[in-house]
Image (cartoon, rainbow, N blue to C red):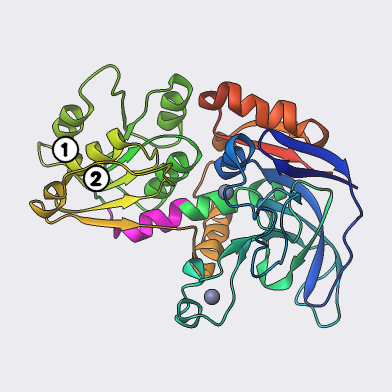
Amino acid sequence: MKAAVFYGPKDIRVDEVDEPELRENTVKVKVEWCGICGTDLHEYLAGPIFVPPEGSPHPITNETLPLTLGHEFAGVVEEVGEGSRFSVGDSVAVNPVYYCGECTECLRGDHNVCKKLGFYGLMGGGGGMSEHAVVPEYMINKLPDGLTTEQGALVEPIAVGLRAVRRSGMKEGDSAVVFGAGPIGAVTVQCLKALGAGKIIVCEVADARKKKALEIGADYVVDPTEEDAVARVLELTDGDGADVSFDAAGIQETFQSALQTTRKGGVFVIVAIWEGEIAHNPNDIVLKELDVRGIICYSKQDFEDTIQMLKEGKFDTEGLITERVALADVVQKGFDELVAHKDRHVKILVKSG
Ligand SMILES: [Zn+2]
Ligand SMILES: [Zn+2]
């Protein structure tokens, strides 16, 4: 079968590989759609970052590169073991989080901060950018009638947005400011909208993303290259700042702007993954009694609730998809396209079969 295999920076190949075989407590899925994540792109440009390099295998999968990519995917069950909760023909989405189940965090139920946290399709096991995937049964979530596998491939990124909004403690009617309207900023906006936020302000510089943000639920878009973004957000929030803020861009400027545009006593959620250290003045947090919180992926509950919210039609998933490409073309039309025109896209989906 075909699979997109990561060998190293700038080296992803669509190889012919052996079709994986069902093992104990796994489900074999005929993959239909898989999203390309910003994380995948980082691996392509500068990896291995999360992908375990030669010599240090992931503690759960015991694998190193080369390995198959793709952690945002959905498909149809094609083979199950005895006693499985699933049946052949079920449409399913994969929650790709590996966790050990034994560490303090796992025992507390916080699998997303497991000491051995890993991702299917990034740390081994197989991946969604392939025609078939054999996936641990605990990762499989059935898609209810009415949801397509294309929507199923969007559950994973949307669940990150849901996690972010839940961590903010946003209450209905609260104002929100989101820095960055790339894939994660966009789903954060959608989740804010779905959970009843009041005014939603997005700070973004790329034209395509500015337009997209307005389409999917932002009330205002502020472009820091055109105006003083902090002043504008304050103006839009009666001089107080937003109740909740989100940094989905991850650069010094957005971090500082978020601190300055969150109201006193408000909550600032850091959603971005950072390339390195930044400078900031802790007094910006202290003197406003800000709550600054991080998030990493999502809980099982967030993932399941995202599926339910999709079923209820709470998200316009079509608005998130900017391109669909065939697996055979994923390097050129997927990865290279994102490198060249990242700002034109929210989500590129790969058709795996
Ligand atoms: Zn991802
Ligand atoms: Zn654990």
Q: Report the magenta residues as a range.
A: 161-172
- Quarter occupied by the C terminus: top right
Which residue is under mark 2? 175
* Residue 340 percent coordinates (x, y): 59, 21
Q: Nearer the viewer, residue 177 or 66?
A: 66
Which residue is under mark 1? 237
Residue 171 in sight here:
no
* 152 sits to left or right of 257: right
Q: Nearer the viewer, residue 144 or 41?
A: 41
Mark 2 vs ligand 1: CB below 8 Å: no
292, above or below 198, in the image:
below
Classify mark 2: residues with Cα within 10 Å, few (<14), some (14-19) or many (20+): many
**Is residue 171 in the magenta section?**
yes
340, above or below 127, in the image:
above
Q: Residue at x 24, y 50 (%)?
A: 174
Residue type at mark 1: give it.
Answer: Thr
* Residue 134 percent coordinates (x, y): 80, 63
Q: Residue at x 68, y 62 (%)?
A: 57
Q: Main secondary structure of the magenta part?
A: helix
**Is residue 200 in the magenta section?**
no
**Extreme residue in the top direction:** 226
